[in-house]
Amino acid sequence: MNLPGTSPEQPSIPQCSAKGCRADAVWVLAWNNPKLHTPERRKTWLACEEHREHLSKFLGVRGFLKDVVGLEEWESAPDR
């Protein structure tokens, strides 16, 4: 799986998607912009503990946030 904050060439611990944050990610925020994406499509942002609420609110206010899942749970899900 290639989550934001990682790359196939340089595997590393996924990092938070918040601007300027380099903390390890522990949450996956699954989202979708209904004007651009089909209903089943899920884009992802990663969040550290500190930025989970802020990033969730940012997506939630726009009606984009679909789910917040722990990174370990997200990575172990068979359908992702």
Image (cartoon, rainbow, N blue to C red):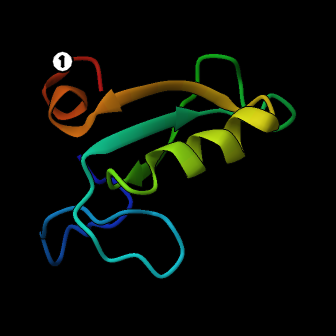
Q: Which residue is drawn at 22% across and 63% down?
A: 24
Task: Estimate the x, y position of residue 22 in percent, counting from the top left.
Answer: 32, 77
Task: Estimate the x, y position of residue 6 in percent, counting from the top left.
Answer: 26, 66
Q: Which residue is drawn at 71% across and 24% down?
A: 38
* Residue type at tag 1: Pro
Residue lying at the far right of the rendered structure: 35
Task: Estimate the x, y position of residue 37 in percent, counting from the top left.
Answer: 73, 32
Q: Image check: 69 left or right of 66?
A: left
Residue named by callout 1: 78
Task: Estimate the x, y position of residue 30 in percent, counting from the top left.
Answer: 50, 33
Q: Image check: 54 left or right of 12?
A: right
Q: Image check: 27 left or right of 64?
A: left
Residue nearest the observer in this picture, 30 or 26? 26
Q: Image check: 75 left or right of 56?
A: left
- Quarter of the figure with residue 41: top right
- Quarter of the figure with residue 62: top right
Q: Crowdedness of circle 1 by 10 Å Cα count: few (<14), some, many (20+)?
A: few
Q: Determine whether 8 is above or below 52 in the image.
A: below
